[in-house]
Image (cartoon, rainbow, N blue to C red):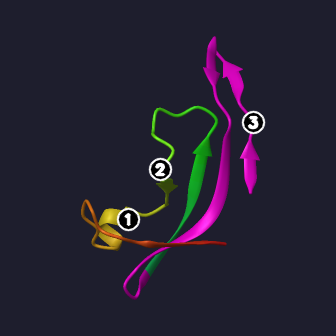
Amino acid sequence: CIEIEGFEYGGKKYYGVKVLPAKICKDEFAARGALIFPEKSDNPKDIVEVISPVNLREYLSLKNGDVVKIIVE
């Protein structure tokens, strides 16, 4: 787990985040990315936030409601 501490800059507060490297898979395709757990979020607890250097919708041909497998690395 990578932890990025929160900070203040220019009078604005930026909250910390925990990051877990992960692989996001659909069928035989996979993309590198990470799960992020922000210190402060408006999302419900059952929502997982995923980031990736590629557009996951395009790369994995995803649409709303698709099921993916997430492997924490």
Q: Residues within 10 Å of mark 3 (few under 14, many from 20)?
A: few
Task: Tell me the kind of residue under disc 1.
Answer: Leu
The residue wearing badge 2 is 46
Q: How crowded is mark 1: few (under 14 residues within 10 Å), some or many (20 or more)?
A: some
Task: Tell me the kind of residue under disc 2.
Answer: Asp
**Percent from the top left, x then y, of residue 35?**
57, 57
| Label ID, residue 56 | 1
**Percent from the top left, x then y, of residue 66?**
29, 68
Residue visible at 45% across and 49% down?
Answer: 47
Separation of disc 2 and disc 3 at Cα? 23 Å
Task: Tell me the kind of residue under disc 3.
Answer: Glu
**Percent from the top left, x then y, of residue 38?**
60, 40
Mark 3 secondary-structure assignment: loop
Nearer-N-terminus badge (3/1): 3
Instruction: Examine the image and state in which quarter residue 55 appears.
Output: bottom left
Mark 1 secondary-structure assignment: helix
Q: How crowded is mark 2: few (under 14 residues within 10 Å), some or many (20 or more)?
A: few
The residue wearing badge 3 is 5
Bounds of the magenta segment:
1-29
Position of residue 22 relative to residue 2, above or below, is below
